[in-house]
Amino acid sequence: MKMKWQNWLERTSRWSVVFFAWFLSLFTLLKDPGTGWSLLHLITLSALLMFTEFFPFPGHEGRVTVHFPFLFTLSSMFSPGLAGVVYTVIVLTVTWSKKHSLYRAAFRTGYTIIGLYGVQLFLATIGITWINQGGIGLPFLALTGCVLVYELVSKGIRDGVEYLRARPRWSRLWLANWKLETGGAVLSLIYCLAYYGMLHVGRETDPLAFLFFYAPLAAFAVLSHVIVKLARKEHKLKILLLLASDINKNLDLRKVMEKTLLPLSKVIPYSFGFFHLMKNGRLHPAVIAGDVPVELKERSLPLNHGISGWVAAHGVPAMVHNTKDDPRCHGDLEAAEELRSLLSVPLIMEGEVLGVITLGKTEERAFDDADLTFLQVLASQSVVAIKNARLLEERERRVVAEERNRLAREIHDGIAQSFAGVLMKVDSSLKIFDSQPEKVREWLEESRLKLRDGLKEVRHSITALRPSPAAKIGLIPALRRRVEAFENETGADGIFEQKGERFPLTSEVEETIYMVCHEALSNAAKHAKAENVRVQLAFSSDHVCLTVEDDGVGFSLAKAVHKAEAQKRYGIVGMSERAQKLGSALQFDSEEGKGTRVILTIPIGEEEEAAVHAH
């Protein structure tokens, strides 16, 4: 209730300022038309004033113009009433042509005209006396006083009315734009001094002279406006790149939006913004930024309720210039009646609405097509990042499931069969324990050996379940550490080499490289009797190659594979299976008495190529 009363007071004060200023202008115009100068002078100054209004400086959301020198000139040459009427017509015309808020434009004419009459009051009391004294000092003080009075009165009214709002928009106040406001005031003072000099030094005062005199000011306004427009476009691209980089580092949609909404205000100014997450057919507020009304912070929205609900239901973006004229926004106005402009974009992945980004402002026509396009691009980038994250998670789950199935097969075919055989012999031993003690001893010895082998298999399976050192500390450090462990275990000399420029690899590729190296070194430690071992990891443009070479006794590959299958050992077979999953080539070069070389060649796939380009 208090908020509604404050907003009513603010609106009433605004219109009071507007009507008072307009009445004052019309009243004084009828009383003193001010026809001392020609119509051509009036047209020239009005045209230049329109240029400065059409190309505003950045600040207060693009509504700051250096209009005081023109108004001061019109007021002194003709009358304050005529200056006020001309300014009102120009501002409303420019605002209408740009489809901006006429409500704000009317208020701007109001406090500007009252500020201009404040200057006339100052001149009527002491200012005109100082100007007529001649010289430089007193006229300078008088004109400085005119600029100060105008700034204090006009900006004081503007900021004072803004303070009446339930939630003042601090970015519009003088303090928030003091550099720009001060620069405009100094520029106005310079031109007022130059205008005084032109009138009192006897220079030409025909319309062409005024055109050349004020043309640099209008040109400066146009040039500044264009430069700022280009700078903002460049800033948009930079912000988009930064946001895209931050987005791709997160897997959670809520965190993605937290990194998006706040920096977004530097590109698309908004009073408040929020991201709704779709859950169970309703929109729930997940991330909030800016001056969001309390009513909007705490409520979830059904589909087709408010602009966010409508966007979620239809899966299309929406831009609203005036919420009062759009029936889709009735739900929003119930929670925040000061809303005027809304921009809302859905986040859609494979036909499913994940959430909705909505930006709001308290002015009409605050957003344009460029803002909508930028927000759509940002939403699409967020969806792509989330989709990639989900695909990565799905692939990791699939890899884990495959690894579990592989371990299950190993346990069933190896450890379980061994333990079953041991159990059968123990049962048989109990039956003939008294009659055939020697046979029992033989069976128990065989069972002991099988249990020892089974225990090794269990330890091997447990090791396989643990996170790989490559995932913990990185592939290169893990390979170096494995070579050092081999040296400590066997007393042989080990060397690790890296060749080529390293680039990022997927976790699955790194895991395969490490496990093949681990198994090859384990086999060398058990069977090779080697004095030297060399491990090399080579990066090239189209593949990654791991080489593990020793100078040991060597072996026959056919015999080794046959023996492994017969004894249910999975070293060489396991390495081959891992290589086949990646479409890689695993090569064993060995002869008895001539050492062994294990070569794993992994071609660069799409994911690795993407990693290379990103690197």
Image: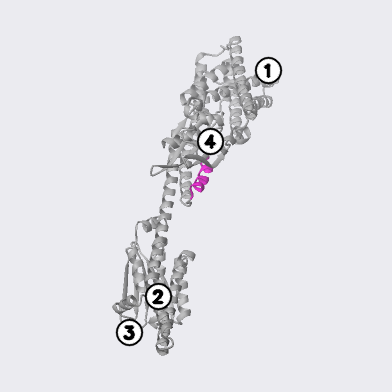
Q: Amino acid at mark 4?
A: Tyr
Q: Nearer the viewer, residue 148 or 357?
A: 357
The range drawn in magenta is: 252-266
Rendered view: 520 above or below 46: below
Spatial CA distance of label 4 from label 1 is: 43 Å
In screen coordinates, is 250 left or right of 573?
right
- Residue that lies at the very extreme toward the top in this rendered image: 31
Is the N terminus in the top left, top right, bottom left or bottom right quadrant?
top right
Q: Which mark is residue 270?
A: 4
Task: Kindly identify the amino acid type of the residue bearing the numbered disc 1.
Answer: Ala
Label 3: few (<14), some (14–19) or many (≥20) C-alpha neighbours in 10 Å = few
Q: Amino acid at mark 2?
A: Ala
Alpha carbons under labels 3 and 4: distance apart: 77 Å
The answer to which of 524 and 116 lies nearer the viewer is: 524
Mark 4 or 1, nearer chain start: 1
Which residue is painted at 38% across and 44% down in the image? 350
- The residue mark sitting in front, 2 or 1, is 2
Proximity of marks 4 and 2: CB atoms separated by less than 8 Å: no
Distance of mark 1 from mark 3, alpha carbons?
Answer: 115 Å
- How far apart are the two marked residues, 3 and 2, measured between alpha carbons? 38 Å
- Say which label, 3 or 2, has the lower sequence index: 2
The residue wearing badge 2 is 420
Mark 4–mark 2 Cα distance, whole angstroms, equals 72 Å
Q: Which residue is mark 1?
A: 124
**Image location (x, y in percent) of residue 363:** 53, 29
Contact, mark 2 vs mark 1 (Cβ under 8 Å):
no
Tell me, yes or no, whether the highlighted magenta stretch contains residue 261: yes
Residue 293 appears in the figure: no
Q: Judging from the image, what secondary structure is the residue with disc 1 in?
A: helix
